[in-house]
């Protein structure tokens, strides 16, 4: 019933797919399709809002129709800009050009400014689009402008915190996210706590990270993307504590929420290696690559899995492919790129060691050390 309920809440037929009982699956498809059809006729605005809330690409077509009417509001243009931006982000993840969606997002922002140039939220969204462009300096400036216009703009503080995180200004990022959390009295914006969980975990504060993740995982009927990310961080925490059962349970919950998130399969691959199931680790790494071909961490996961299977030549090929992706991988923070390059080169060195090629082993060990020294 959980999947059925979520499919109906977000009007997403894809969520019906994993329902195992065929009669329930058929009922899910029928109810969702009927609900969509009714809203398309009676309340297209509500349908567009549901799609936007669930990060469904169908939000673009729905909002485009609404904004073509004279009755379109500034919020419609803001929502459309966000929908375009999210589509651009997905294109980046697939290694494709996101610029057309970035341009469309900026066009929607211009329309919003024509209706109300003094609305803080417009500049917050413009900043977010600049993150995807990417232009982090411009994004940070616009987030600050949004805050100056409205000192209670929770998402502007959170957005600026995210930019600082991308720029590796971690203390500043935590400060902005904590300010956002202070303003979020009802704890409605889970994005804040997911990021705080991630930041605290990266700093080694597992207790504080777990506290923030649980704020997200304990909520019901909330944004599936941020809740999934919280479960994934918890899975990593459980794995490092040696609890593979809890780790797997967290990953399965995450997969229910966002079944095509490549990061879930990368973490599954790491868990498989932890458990000694190397063939399954390879399968999960390849699934991550299929979902996001431009993701260097997917290639690293594959390289590790192949190494454990004694497929050293293939492991090297995967690691070299990962190295070629790092520079343009928007999912990696700048410091993380150096760590990723170190890990990929270390993986190659390990393969050459097992193959008895000491010259190549030394070559890649030196490269790995260079990236370590540049951290």
Image (cartoon, rainbow, N blue to C red):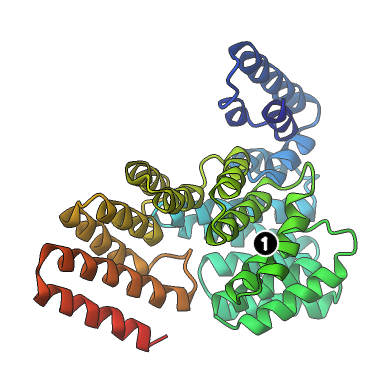
232 vs 348, left or right, is right
238 vs 188, left or right, is left
Residue 274, how many percent across, how many down?
43, 53
**Residue 349 appears in the rendering:** yes
Residue 183 vs 238, above or below: the answer is below
Q: Nearer the viewer, residue 309 or 219?
A: 309
372 vs 137, left or right, is left
Residue 253, how many percent across, how many down?
63, 42
Q: Which residue is mark 1?
A: 109
Residue lying at the far right of the rendered structure: 185
**How many numbered callouts?**
1
Residue lying at the far top of the rendered structure: 23
Q: Nearer the viewer, residue 343 or 355?
A: 355
Residue 127, how many percent across, how many down?
64, 70
Q: Quadrant of residue 315?
A: bottom left
Residue drawn at x 61%, y 25% is 16
Residue drawn at x 29%, y 57% is 303
Residue drawn at x 31%, y 62% is 322
Q: Nearer the viewer, residue 111 or 145?
A: 145
Q: Secondary structure at mark 1?
A: helix
């Amino acid at each position: 019933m959980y999947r059925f309920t979520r499919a109906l809440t977000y009007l997403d037929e894809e969520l019906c797919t994993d329902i195992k009982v065929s009669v329930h699956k058929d009922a899910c498809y029928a109810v969702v399709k009927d609900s969509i059809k009714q809203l398309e006729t009676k309340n297209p605005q509500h349908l567009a809002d549901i799609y936007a809330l669930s990060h469904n690409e169908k939000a673009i077509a729905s909002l485009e129709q609404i904004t073509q009417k004279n009755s379109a509001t500034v919020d419609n243009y803001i929502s459309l800009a966000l929908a375009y931006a999210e589509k651009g982000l997905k294109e980046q993840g697939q290694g494709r050009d996101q610029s057309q969606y970035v341009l469309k997002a900026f066009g929607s922002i211009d329309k919003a400014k024509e209706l109300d140039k003094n609305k803080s939220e417009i500049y917050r969204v413009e900043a977010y689009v600049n993150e995807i462009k990417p232009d982090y300096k411009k994004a940070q400036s616009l987030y600050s402008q949004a805050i100056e216009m409205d000192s209670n703009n929770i998402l502007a503080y959170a957005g600026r915190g995210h930019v600082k995180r991308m720029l590796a200004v971690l203390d500043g990022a935590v400060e902005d996210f904590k300010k956002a959390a202070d303003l979020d009295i009802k704890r409605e914006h889970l994005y804040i706590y997911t990021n705080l969980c991630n930041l605290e975990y990266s700093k080694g504060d597992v207790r504080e990270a777990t506290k923030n993740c649980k704020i997200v995982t304990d909520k019901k009927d909330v944004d599936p993307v941020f809740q999934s990310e919280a479960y994934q961080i918890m899975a990593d925490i459980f794995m490092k504590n040696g609890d593979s059962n809890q780790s797997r349970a967290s990953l399965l919950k995450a997969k229910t929420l966002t079944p095509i998130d490549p990061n879930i399969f990368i973490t599954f691959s790491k868990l498989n290696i932890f458990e000694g199931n190397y063939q399954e680790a390879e399968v999960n790494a390849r699934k991550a690559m299929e979902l996001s071909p431009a993701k260097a961490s997917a290639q690293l996961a594959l390289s590790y899995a192949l190494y454990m299977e004694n497929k050293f030549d293939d492991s090297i090929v995967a690691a070299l492919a990962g190295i070629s992706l790092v520079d343009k991988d928007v999912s990696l923070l700048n410091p993380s790129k150096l760590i990723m390059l170190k890990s990929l080169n270390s993986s190659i060195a390990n393969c050459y060691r097992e193959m008895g090629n000491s010259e190549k082993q030394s070559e890649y060990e030196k490269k790995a050390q260079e990236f370590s020294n540049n951290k």
